[in-house]
Amino acid sequence: MLNRISCLVAGGLTLLSSLAATTAHAEKLFLNESGWEIWQGDTIVEGCTIEKEFNDGTYVLMGFDSQTSESYIQMFNDDFEDVEDGVNYPVRIDIDGARYNGEAYGSNDGEYVGFEIAQNDLGFLLDLANKNTLTLTDSSGDSYSLSLAGTRNALGGMMACFEDFVSQ
Protein backbone atom coordinates (compact mmCIF):
# COMPACT_ATOMS: atom_id res chain seq x y z
CA MET A 1 0.00 0.00 0.00
CA LEU A 2 2.82 2.42 0.87
CA ASN A 3 4.44 1.88 -2.54
CA ARG A 4 1.09 2.54 -4.25
CA ILE A 5 0.64 5.76 -2.27
CA SER A 6 4.25 6.80 -3.04
CA CYS A 7 3.71 6.18 -6.75
CA LEU A 8 0.39 8.05 -6.67
CA VAL A 9 1.90 11.06 -4.92
CA ALA A 10 5.05 11.09 -7.08
CA GLY A 11 3.01 10.72 -10.26
CA GLY A 12 0.57 13.38 -9.11
CA LEU A 13 3.39 15.81 -8.32
CA THR A 14 4.89 15.23 -11.77
CA LEU A 15 1.50 15.95 -13.32
CA LEU A 16 0.93 19.02 -11.14
CA SER A 17 4.32 20.56 -11.78
CA SER A 18 3.88 20.19 -15.56
CA LEU A 19 0.44 21.84 -15.70
CA ALA A 20 -0.29 25.52 -16.01
CA ALA A 21 -3.81 26.75 -15.39
CA THR A 22 -5.07 28.84 -18.28
CA THR A 23 -8.59 29.80 -17.20
CA ALA A 24 -10.06 31.57 -14.20
CA HIS A 25 -11.70 29.37 -11.57
CA ALA A 26 -14.09 30.24 -8.76
CA GLU A 27 -13.30 29.07 -5.23
CA LYS A 28 -15.44 26.05 -4.33
CA LEU A 29 -15.57 23.15 -1.94
CA PHE A 30 -14.53 20.13 -4.01
CA LEU A 31 -14.80 17.34 -1.43
CA ASN A 32 -14.87 16.45 2.26
CA GLU A 33 -12.47 13.62 2.99
CA SER A 34 -11.51 12.08 6.34
CA GLY A 35 -12.21 15.26 8.31
CA TRP A 36 -10.46 17.55 5.80
CA GLU A 37 -12.09 19.94 3.34
CA ILE A 38 -10.59 20.00 -0.15
CA TRP A 39 -10.95 23.40 -1.82
CA GLN A 40 -10.48 24.20 -5.48
CA GLY A 41 -9.91 27.60 -7.03
CA ASP A 42 -7.45 30.41 -7.42
CA THR A 43 -8.12 32.54 -4.34
CA ILE A 44 -5.65 30.82 -2.00
CA VAL A 45 -3.50 29.04 -4.57
CA GLU A 46 -3.95 28.17 -8.22
CA GLY A 47 -5.40 24.69 -7.81
CA CYS A 48 -6.37 22.83 -4.65
CA THR A 49 -5.72 22.79 -0.90
CA ILE A 50 -6.75 20.60 1.99
CA GLU A 51 -7.97 22.48 5.05
CA LYS A 52 -9.03 21.62 8.57
CA GLU A 53 -9.81 23.41 11.83
CA PHE A 54 -8.57 21.58 14.92
CA ASN A 55 -10.17 21.57 18.39
CA ASP A 56 -7.57 24.01 19.76
CA GLY A 57 -8.55 26.61 17.13
CA THR A 58 -5.63 25.95 14.81
CA TYR A 59 -6.60 26.24 11.16
CA VAL A 60 -4.34 24.25 8.81
CA LEU A 61 -3.99 24.40 5.04
CA MET A 62 -1.78 21.96 3.11
CA GLY A 63 -1.08 21.79 -0.55
CA PHE A 64 1.34 21.69 -3.41
CA ASP A 65 2.46 24.80 -5.27
CA SER A 66 2.86 23.80 -8.93
CA GLN A 67 4.73 27.05 -9.63
CA THR A 68 7.56 26.31 -7.17
CA SER A 69 7.19 22.49 -6.95
CA GLU A 70 6.98 22.79 -3.16
CA SER A 71 4.65 21.21 -0.63
CA TYR A 72 3.49 23.61 2.04
CA ILE A 73 1.68 23.83 5.33
CA GLN A 74 0.03 27.00 6.60
CA MET A 75 -1.08 27.16 10.23
CA PHE A 76 -3.11 29.92 11.86
CA ASN A 77 -4.15 30.30 15.50
CA ASP A 78 -4.86 33.32 17.71
CA ASP A 79 -2.46 31.81 20.25
CA PHE A 80 0.43 32.42 17.82
CA GLU A 81 0.30 36.10 18.84
CA ASP A 82 4.11 36.49 18.94
CA VAL A 83 4.45 35.72 15.23
CA GLU A 84 5.60 38.78 13.30
CA ASP A 85 4.54 39.43 9.73
CA GLY A 86 7.30 38.79 7.17
CA VAL A 87 9.76 37.24 9.66
CA ASN A 88 11.36 33.86 8.93
CA TYR A 89 11.61 31.56 11.93
CA PRO A 90 13.91 28.51 11.86
CA VAL A 91 11.98 25.35 12.77
CA ARG A 92 12.66 21.65 13.22
CA ILE A 93 9.98 19.49 11.69
CA ASP A 94 9.45 15.98 13.01
CA ILE A 95 6.93 13.65 11.38
CA ASP A 96 7.01 10.46 13.48
CA GLY A 97 10.81 10.49 13.56
CA ALA A 98 11.44 11.76 10.02
CA ARG A 99 13.20 15.09 10.54
CA TYR A 100 13.35 18.13 8.31
CA ASN A 101 14.79 21.58 8.84
CA GLY A 102 12.92 24.54 7.52
CA GLU A 103 11.77 28.08 7.97
CA ALA A 104 8.35 29.23 9.01
CA TYR A 105 7.41 32.45 7.23
CA GLY A 106 5.39 34.60 9.64
CA SER A 107 2.06 36.15 8.74
CA ASN A 108 0.23 38.56 11.02
CA ASP A 109 -2.23 40.96 9.43
CA GLY A 110 -4.04 41.73 12.69
CA GLU A 111 -6.86 39.32 11.86
CA TYR A 112 -5.01 36.09 11.04
CA VAL A 113 -1.82 35.06 12.80
CA GLY A 114 0.28 32.15 11.65
CA PHE A 115 2.98 30.94 9.34
CA GLU A 116 3.80 28.94 6.24
CA ILE A 117 6.42 26.24 5.87
CA ALA A 118 7.41 25.08 2.38
CA GLN A 119 9.52 22.04 1.47
CA ASN A 120 10.74 20.81 -1.91
CA ASP A 121 11.57 17.31 -0.61
CA LEU A 122 9.14 14.68 -1.96
CA GLY A 123 9.67 12.70 1.26
CA PHE A 124 8.04 15.54 3.20
CA LEU A 125 4.72 15.18 1.38
CA LEU A 126 4.90 11.38 1.57
CA ASP A 127 5.48 11.60 5.33
CA LEU A 128 2.52 13.97 5.73
CA ALA A 129 0.40 11.42 3.87
CA ASN A 130 1.60 8.29 5.64
CA LYS A 131 2.49 9.20 9.22
CA ASN A 132 0.55 10.19 12.32
CA THR A 133 1.94 13.29 14.04
CA LEU A 134 3.65 16.46 12.87
CA THR A 135 5.69 18.28 15.54
CA LEU A 136 7.21 21.71 14.93
CA THR A 137 9.88 23.02 17.28
CA ASP A 138 11.14 26.59 17.13
CA SER A 139 14.61 27.86 18.03
CA SER A 140 13.59 28.47 21.67
CA GLY A 141 12.52 24.82 22.06
CA ASP A 142 8.76 25.48 22.08
CA SER A 143 6.88 22.70 20.27
CA TYR A 144 3.50 22.34 18.64
CA SER A 145 2.09 18.95 17.59
CA LEU A 146 -0.64 18.23 15.10
CA SER A 147 -2.46 15.00 14.26
CA LEU A 148 -2.15 13.89 10.65
CA ALA A 149 -5.20 11.60 10.89
CA GLY A 150 -6.96 11.42 7.54
CA THR A 151 -4.21 13.26 5.70
CA ARG A 152 -3.43 10.37 3.32
CA ASN A 153 -7.01 10.21 2.06
CA ALA A 154 -7.28 14.00 1.91
CA LEU A 155 -4.07 14.32 -0.13
CA GLY A 156 -5.39 11.62 -2.47
CA GLY A 157 -8.56 13.69 -2.82
CA MET A 158 -6.43 16.75 -3.50
CA MET A 159 -4.80 14.93 -6.44
CA ALA A 160 -8.26 14.19 -7.86
CA CYS A 161 -9.12 17.86 -7.30
CA PHE A 162 -6.08 18.97 -9.32
CA GLU A 163 -6.98 16.63 -12.16
CA ASP A 164 -10.47 18.14 -12.22
CA PHE A 165 -9.08 21.69 -11.93
CA VAL A 166 -6.82 21.43 -14.97
CA SER A 167 -9.49 19.74 -17.07
CA GLN A 168 -11.77 22.79 -16.80
Image (tube, grey):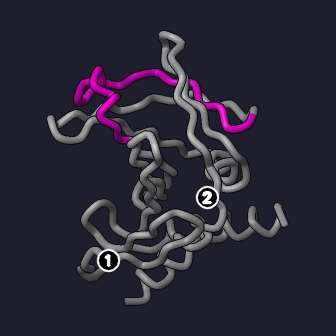
In-front residue for pair 21/138:
138
Is residue 150 one of those drawn in magenta? no
Residue 23 placement, left or right of 149: left
Is residue 92 one of those drawn in magenta? yes
Q: How far apart in space, not on screen, are marks 1 and 2 (Cα)?
A: 20 Å
Residue 149 placement, left or right of 27: right
Q: Residue at x 39, y 48 (%)?
A: 59
Image spot of residue 109 (x, y percent)? 16, 37
Q: Residue at x 35, y 32 (%)?
A: 105
Image spot of residue 4 (x, y percent)? 80, 69
Q: Which residues are magenta?
A: 76-96
In-front residue for pair 120/149:
149
The residue positioned farthest toward the left in the image shown? 110
For the question of whether residue 13 can be seen, the reply is no
Name which residue type carries label 1.
Lys
Image spot of residue 45 (x, y percent)? 33, 61
- The relative height of residue 75 versus residue 15 in the rendered view (above or below) is above
Residue with the mark numbered 1? 28
- The relative height of residue 31 versus residue 14 in the rendered view (above or below) is below
Could you say whether the residue bearing mark 2 is in a helix, strand or loop? helix
Could you say whether the residue bearing mark 1 is in a helix, strand or loop? strand
Image spot of residue 16 (x, y percent)? 51, 69
Q: Residue at x 42, y 79 (%)?
A: 30
Question: Which labelled disc corresponds to residue 151?
Answer: 2
Q: Quadrant of the C terminus?
A: bottom left
For the question of whether residue 114 can be seen, the reply is yes
Q: Quadrant of the N terminus?
A: bottom right
